[in-house]
Image (cartoon, rainbow, N blue to C red):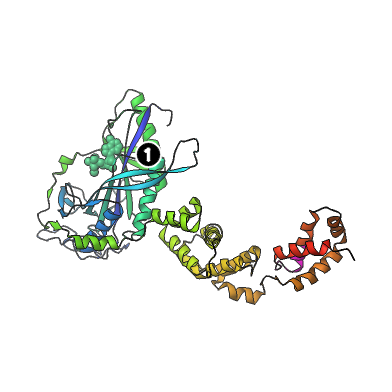
């Protein structure tokens, strides 16, 4: 793509299901269930004569999101009707926002790899956010696919009216990797502020990708297509990759891009035309007459601002600065809130803490713990090892009570039993031997049994020490403190031979 005469321009529209107990305009439960049409009422099935009542919690979560994404808040706002017919939309219109979204003009910072000499060096890029607005979800159609005789669809209205947030970016995204980074940063923020589960597979986060191409250096935007139906961040990246290549080819062959909606086919790895895209005026937007306008006062906005926790980007920088973690470790630890919490709880339980404690802990979490959890298909919230217990284990390594090697044995036990390290160490007699007198006895035995290596060392062959240290470790079943053994061996061997 880089040496192509064309460059892509991408803007993403992300829909997020808000974590509320009830729907946007009625009291029906939002709980997911496979039984169709159980969480429904006259309002969310669009019966005549009913009136919507806005869900306060949903609007607060919307404002929280908008503020976390650095948006301005329209103090005076309204809902709008977007009119269109589709079988999953029982009212034949969707209540959404049009001219006056709750949030506008925000931004999100993403990490990108710049094509610089130091290609690996991460850099930041700001993606502007155009709007964060409130709307309601549609129902779900279930198509009886694959059989001509069963040529019908079923509709489930459980999802109809579930609060949805739409987060629209400006066309600031320059390639599919940046789109991926944007989604990942966005998801991270949404999870930190606890407004949504953001589970793309379950549909609580959905992304429509808008993409166009233009000649490099040109400032005007080309005609865009909109791609739908991606169910992972990876498929968003793949779909954009494909669509950009397709557009370059069309234009390269003298053709024109048609403004349309295209569907990503995850199996075939292609996008196909679904419908030509409606223009805004096709929807006949007008202010929703059944809902009053909203006025947000400063007290409400301030209260919501106070409720926003430290966001991942900030926390990451703090871990780098205060704990001297590497950018990489800090990034892994802060991407998901439960893991960040795990780290902080574990660190807090390491008492007393040394300047090296956070690094050692980060290492253990990112390699041993995550490695083991991944292999067992578990997330950190399902970890059998509590953060306090891991903190204790790392502390035991730090103080030299157990060796790193023994720690791995203890950790394996902790993973399968969930027990505290002290109990395991006591039961298995794994405490590290650092007592010099005790170790000297072992060392004397080892020298007797390995006269050749001892003589070689005395004759100046320094490498011979390794095998002697190994022999001591073996004799103590790995419990000897290797540093002390090293020191003592050198002392003993520099004494005149007996
Ligand atoms: P529509 O009315 O078609 O939904 P919007 O102006 O609301 O268009 O923009 C929808 C999304 O498409 C936004 O994320 C925006 O950044 C992006 N977008 C708009 N124009 C272009 C373009 N020419 N190329 C790529 N993305 C675009
Ligand atoms: Mg739009
Ligand atoms: Zn309802």
Residue 178 image point, x, y percent: 39, 42
Queried on whether the Cβ of the residue with tag 1 lies below 8 angstroms from ligand 1, the answer reads: no
Above or below 121: residue 426: below
Asked whether residue 236 is in view, the answer is: no
Quadrant containing the C terminus in the rendered view: bottom right
Asked whether residue 183 is in view, the answer is: yes
Q: Quadrant of the rendered structure where residue 249 is? A: top left
In the displayed structure image, the side of residue 176 where residue 88 appears, left or right: left
Residue 305 image point, x, y percent: 27, 60
Q: Is residue 474 magenta?
A: yes
Taking depth in this image into account, of 425 and 252 the one nearest to the observer is 425
Mark 1 highlights which residue?
A: 240
Element class at badge 1: helix
* Residue furthest out toward the top: 254
Q: Is residue 230 magenta?
A: no
Quadrant containing the N terminus in the rendered view: top left
Q: Which residues lie in the magenta part?
A: 470-480
Taking depth in this image into account, of 238 and 222 the one nearest to the observer is 222
Taking depth in this image into account, of 432 and 290 the one nearest to the observer is 432
In the displayed structure image, the side of residue 176 where residue 466 appears, left or right: right
In the displayed structure image, the side of residue 88 where residue 389 appears, left or right: right
């Amino acid at each position: 793509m880089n040496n192509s005469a064309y460059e892509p321009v991408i803007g993403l529209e992300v829909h997020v299901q808000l974590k509320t107990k009830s729907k946007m305009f009625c009291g029906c439960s939002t709980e997911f269930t496979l039984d169709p049409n159980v969480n429904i009422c006259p309002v969310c099935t669009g019966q005549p004569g009913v009136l919507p009542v806005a869900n306060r919690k949903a609007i607060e979560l919307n404002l929280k999101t908008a503020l976390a994404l650095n948006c301005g808040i329209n103090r005076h706002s309204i809902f709008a009707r977007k009119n269109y017919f589709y079988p999953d939309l029982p009212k034949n219109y969707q209540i959404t926002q049009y001219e006056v979204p709750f949030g506008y003009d925000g931004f999100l910072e993403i990490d990108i790899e710049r094509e610089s000499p130091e290609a690996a060096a991460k850099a930041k890029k700001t993606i502007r956010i155009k709007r964060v607005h409130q709307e309601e979800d549609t129902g779900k159609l279930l198509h009886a696919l694959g059989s001509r005789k069963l040529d019908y669809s079923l509709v489930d209205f459980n999802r109809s009216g579930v609060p949805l947030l739409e987060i629209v970016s400006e066309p600031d995204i320059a390639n599919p990797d940046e789109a991926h980074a944007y989604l990942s940063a966005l998801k991270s923020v949404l999870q930190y502020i606890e407004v949504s589960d953001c589970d793309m597979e379950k549909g609580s986060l959905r992304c429509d990708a808008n993409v166009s191409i233009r000649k490099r250096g040109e400032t005007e935007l080309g005609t865009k297509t909109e791609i739908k139906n991606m169910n992972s961040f990876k498929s968003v990246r793949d779909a954009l990759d494909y669509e950009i290549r397709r557009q370059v080819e069309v234009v390269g062959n003298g053709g024109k891009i048609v403004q349309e909606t295209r569907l990503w086919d995850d199996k075939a790895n292609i996008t196909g035309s679904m419908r030509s895209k409606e223009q805004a005026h096709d929807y006949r937007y007008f202010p929703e007459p059944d809902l009053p306008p909203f006025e947000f006062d400063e007290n409400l906005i301030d209260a919501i601002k106070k409720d926003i926790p430290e966001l991942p980007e900030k926390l990451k920088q703090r871990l780098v600065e205060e704990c001297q973690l590497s950018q990489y470790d800090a990034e892994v630890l802060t991407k998901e809130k439960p893991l960040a919490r795990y780290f902080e709880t574990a660190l807090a339980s390491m008492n007393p803490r040394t300047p090296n404690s956070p690094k050692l802990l980060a290492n253990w979490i990112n390699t041993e713990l995550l490695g083991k959890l991944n292999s067992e298909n578990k997330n950190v919230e399902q970890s059998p090892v509590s953060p306090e217990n891991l903190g204790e284990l790392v502390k035991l390594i730090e103080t030299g009570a157990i060796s790193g090697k023994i720690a791995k044995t203890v950790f394996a036990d902790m993973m399968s039993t969930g027990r505290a390290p002290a109990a395991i160490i006591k039961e298995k007699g794994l405490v590290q031997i650092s007592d010099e007198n005790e170790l000297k006895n072992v060392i004397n035995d080892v020298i007797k049994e390995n006269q050749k290596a001892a003589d070689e060392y005395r004759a100046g062959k320094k490498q011979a020490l390794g095998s002697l240290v190994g022999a001591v470790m073996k004799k103590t079943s790995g419990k000897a403190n290797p540093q002390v053994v090293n020191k003592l061996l050198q002392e003993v061997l520099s004494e005149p031979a007996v």
